[in-house]
């Protein structure tokens, strides 16, 4: 890291953190959120659900295993340690950076962020920053990396220009412009309505032998059905789910007018709830980690899950719908999963593909694909 780089992270309430800069010398603004994972930063940094967010890591040491090569991939050419083709976070905040020591390391986190024009700040009290976000809730903020000292006047001007990404349809920035097709081995085909899908979801489906088609998030029902799918996955993605109006309408048609098995993941689960007539709300500081406990209300079994979401379904809003709550978060009792009462439709707030994280709930893919095989 260059000692000449300085960095400042200014929250919308005026709280200022100053530290050493790394990555690109630039200025960005976005929603400041925290993640409590101890590992998995290559997957995290490339997760499309973090689009327009400045991510704070609570684990104090980041970078110890470096950044792996994209050449490490599965037989379909999907990189094993990345969730998209580029870094998706707006900025990165850590307590300290470590020199990498790992056989798969191709470069450092610093060099990676520099190459993709993403700024980072280190040497700050991430515990104090996280406590502030937990107490006051997720906030907007600006992150600046430069060789100059922090200018209070410039910082004040930056705060006046803050733009809440959740007020806009930002899914369009991470959804593919046209369908992407992956051939399978067993003849079955799954359409992934791509609202910012992690590669891990596609890897998990391909590993089961099915073909996969990733479609734009605003694809119509007719366009989707042209692929003759055996099942539909509605993927994760960034922002407020209510902004995905076309996806919600298409999902409503899929629920009402077809008998295809559906699986909603993260944002996709929220879209299922909205399509059924429910509502969503924003969590105070979201769920972002690889250790969230979720309780299966039917079996009483608890699973440890990987999560990254700022919104969830309002439980009371689906009481009079054809859906029921299937999972709840053990920590805050919010809805973590829903299930249709008669059709093969499930939604979960977490990432059953892990990537990274525990593999406790990968059986959900087997359940979904089993339904798809019978459709």
Image: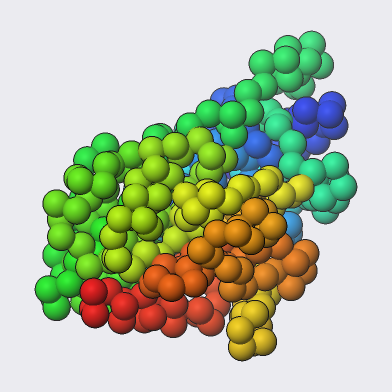
Tell me, what colour scheme is on the image? rainbow
Give the left or right position of residue 312, taking residue 202 as reference: right
Q: 86 or 12, which lies in front? A: 12
Tell me the quarter of the picture where residue 295 sits: bottom right
Where's residue 184, x and y in %? 16, 70
Q: 32 or 255, which lies in front? A: 255
Indicate whether 300 appears above or below 161.
below
Give the left or right position of residue 89, taking residue 228 as reference: right
Could you tell me which residue is drawn at 28 percent across and 60 percent down? Answer: 258
Indicate whether 237 appears above or below 120.
below
Could you tell me which residue is drawn at 61 percent across and 48 percent down? Answer: 279
Q: Quadrant of the N terminus?
A: top right
Where's residue 224, x and y in %? 22, 50
Could you tell me which residue is drawn at 38 percent across and 38 percent down? Answer: 246
Residue 359 seen in this snapshot: yes
Could you tell me which residue is drawn at 65 percent across and 74 percent down? Answer: 294
Where's residue 131, x and y in %? 85, 50
Q: Quadrant of the C terminus?
A: bottom left
Q: Residue furthest front?
A: 320
Give the left or right position of residue 277, taking residue 178 as reference: right
Where's residue 349, x and y in %? 56, 62
Tell me the quarter of the picture where residue 315 sits: bottom right
Give the left or right position of residue 52, taking residue 257 as reference: right
Indicate whether 295 appears above or below 287.
below
Q: How many marks?
A: 0
Residue 49 seen in this snapshot: no
């Amino acid at each position: 890291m260059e000692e000449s780089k300085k960095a400042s992270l200014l929250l919308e309430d005026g709280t200022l953190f100053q530290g050493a800069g790394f990555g690109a010398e630039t200025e960005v603004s976005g929603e400041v959120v925290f993640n409590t994972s101890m590992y998995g930063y290559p997957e995290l940094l490339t997760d499309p659900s973090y689009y327009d967010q400045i991510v704070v890591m609570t684990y104090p040491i980041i970078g110890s295993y470096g950044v792996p090569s994209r050449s490490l991939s599965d037989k379909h050419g999907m990189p094993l340690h990345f969730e998209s083709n580029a870094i998706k976070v707006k900025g990165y905040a850590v307590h300290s950076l470590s020199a990498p020591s790992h056989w798969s390391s191709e470069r450092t986190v610093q060099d990676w962020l520099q190459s993709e024009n993403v700024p980072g700040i280190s040497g700050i009290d991430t515990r104090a920053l996280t406590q502030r976000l937990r107490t006051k809730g997720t906030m907007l903020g600006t992150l600046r990396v430069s060789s100059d000292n922090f200018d209070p006047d410039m910082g004040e001007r930056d705060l006046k220009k803050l733009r809440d990404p959740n007020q806009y349809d930002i899914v369009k920035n991470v959804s593919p412009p046209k369908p992407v097709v992956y051939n399978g081995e067993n003849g079955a085909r799954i359409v992934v309505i791509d609202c910012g899908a992690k590669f891990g979801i596609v890897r998990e489906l391909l590993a089961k032998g099915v073909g996969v088609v990733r479609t734009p998030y605003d694809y119509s029902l007719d366009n989707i059905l042209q692929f003759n799918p055996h099942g539909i996955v509605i993927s994760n993605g960034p922002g407020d789910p209510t902004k995905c109006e076309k996806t919600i309408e298409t999902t409503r048609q899929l629920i009402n007018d077809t008998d295809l098995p559906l699986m909603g993941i993260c944002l996709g689960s929220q879209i299922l709830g909205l399509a059924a007539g429910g509502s969503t709300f924003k969590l105070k500081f979201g769920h972002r980690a690889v250790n969230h406990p979720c309780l299966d209300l039917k079996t009483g079994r608890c699973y440890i899950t990987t999560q990254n979401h700022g919104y969830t379904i309002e439980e009371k809003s689906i009481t009079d719908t054809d859906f029921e709550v299937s999972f709840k978060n053990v920590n805050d009792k919010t809805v973590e999963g829903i299930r249709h009462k008669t059709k093969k439709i499930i939604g979960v707030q977490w990432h059953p593909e892990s990537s990274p994280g525990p593999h406790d709930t990968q059986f959900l893919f087997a359940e979904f694909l089993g339904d798809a095989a019978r459709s």
